[in-house]
Image (spheres, rainbow, N blue to C red):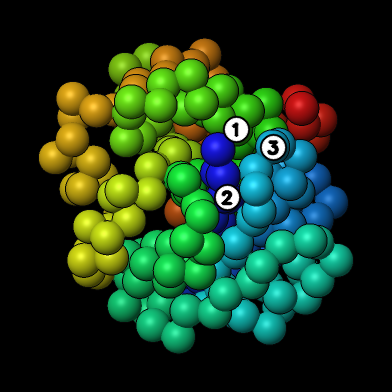
Amino acid sequence: MNIYGLLLAAGQSVRMGQPKQLLSWRGQPLVAHIAAEALAVPLTGLVVVVGAAEDAVRAALRDLPITIVPNPDFAAGLSTSLATGLRALPATADAAMILLVDQPLVTARLMRQLINAYQSRPDVLAVIPRYRGQRGNPVIIAAPLFNELYQLSGDSGARTVLERYSDQICWLDVDDPAVVTDVDTPAAWQTVVGEYGQSSTNK
């Protein structure tokens, strides 16, 4: 299967007050850390969508073997970055793992769990992680849903599309709060840094 990683890193980080992509996480910009985790798993390729603070984000990623795609409409919301990234994938893509730049605890190990679940269930259209009953990210979405994802607008993510296919979703229950931990505000960031910032990544 050709499963591509799609890292959405174009947002304006309004609530954070500074670019989340460039926050220092374990000695490197957060966007570079997440990209490196994705490059450590068996993905066919990794596409990173950039927008806000584009030049600085590109610089943070300059040494990595990835494809960078600009989203000139990033201010219009998450849906535009999702569509931009999906359209950048080759026609041979079977699925995409959607990665968010504000989830610093997501590891290569977790990504491999998602990939293994998807490869073992060729009948499903998506794999969604769940921690203690709470749905999380990243998710893997099969190519047959890409056209519907292009129709989203504003800050809508894939959830509204996936809800239409609830009987074709594989729920992956994980014992890892990473899938429900994101950092949208300075307070949330300080909490995550205080609890996990010095830990080594579990690959």
Q: Which residue is at 14% across, 40% downward?
A: 164
Circle 2 packing at 10 Å, graded few (<14), some (14-19), many (20+), is many
Q: Secondary structure at mark 2?
A: strand
Image side of residue 40 versus residue 173, left or right: right
User: Closer to the N terminus: mark 1 or mark 3?
Assistant: 3
Q: Which residue is mark 3?
A: 42
Say if mark 2 contacts mark 1, CB within 8 Å: yes
Residue 109 horizontal/vertical position (percent): 67, 26
Please, what is the three-letter code of the amino acid marked with disc 3? Pro
The percent position of residue 9, horizontal first and vertical second, equals 55, 64
Circle 1 residue = 111
Residue sitting at x 77%, y 76%: 59
Please state the horizontal and vertical placement of residue 102, each as a whole percent of the image. Answer: 53, 51
**Which residue type carries mark 1?**
Met
Whether residue 192 is visible to the viewer of this picture, yes or no, is: no
The amino acid type of the residue labelled 2 equals: Gly
